[in-house]
Amino acid sequence: MKSKMLMLAGVAGMLMASPSVNALADVNIRVGGAPARAIVIDRPPAFIRLAAPGFSVSVGAPYDIVLAGNFYYLYDHGQWYRSARYNGPWRSVRVRELPPRVRRYRIDQIRRFRDNEYRRNRDRYDRRWRDERRNDRWDDRRDDFRDGRPMPPR
């Protein structure tokens, strides 16, 4: 009995004398797809309709945006994103989730189609977009206030 007590005391002493070990754990759980990317587009981009591929491509936008069907597809740094609106929220999609008519072409081919179409019809596109910008500026001026009152409609 005495030896059992000494053995228990020795084990207890060793446990108390040993340094404590902190166990750290890091757990990440993601449910669903990839989080929406923070992509900011401050105004609707201008699009060129590409007849041969069968979709529209943005011109002058900070990103390559394809409008196919009811969705916008944005290409950025090797990744495709999809949204129902031009300003997001953007959800990451795999290439096989792109519409077949978009998936058929590489991004450099799409850019080449866009550039060729723009060069062929530059005057038409520039005139249309200039008129759209003029109308946007006119709408902004009508929102101005004079003497605290809104400007009358014209």
Image (spheres, grey):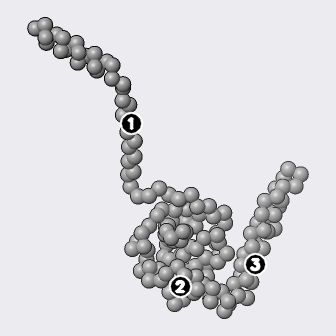
Query: What amino acid is at disc 3?
Result: Arg
The Cα–Cα distance between marks 2 and 1, rounded to whole angstroms, is: 50 Å
- Residue on which the image places disc 3: 130
Q: Inspect the image, locate mark 1, and give the three-letter code of the amino acid beneath it.
A: Leu
Q: Could you tell me which residue is drawn at 49 percent across and 81 percent down?
A: 106
Residue 136, percent from left and from top: 74, 69
Residue 66 point in image, percent of width and height = 54, 76
Q: Is label 2 or label 1 in front? A: 1
Image-based side of 5 in relation to 21, left or right = left
What amino acid is found at the position of numbered circle 2 in the picture?
Gln
The answer to which of marks 2 and 1 sits earlier in the sequence is 1
149 or 17: nearer the eye? 17
Q: Residues within 10 Å of mark 1 (few under 14, many from 20)?
A: few
Q: Which part of the image, by quadrant, shows the N terminus?
A: top left
Q: Does 20 appear above or below 115? A: above
**Residue, far left:** 1
Between 88 and 32, which is closer to the camera in this rendering? 32
Q: Residue at x 36, y 34 (%)?
A: 23
Disc 1 on helix, strand or loop? loop
The residue sitting at 28% across, 19% down in the picture is: 14
Could you say which quadrant of the image residue 45 lies in?
A: bottom right
Indicate which disc, 3 or 2, sits on the residue closer to the N terminus: 2
Q: Position of residue 17 (x, y in %)?
A: 33, 19
> Dot 2 corresponds to which residue?
109
Secondary element type, mark 3: helix
| Residue sitting nearer the eye, 14 or 102 | 14
Sequence-first tag of 1 and 3:
1
Residue at numbered disc 1? 24
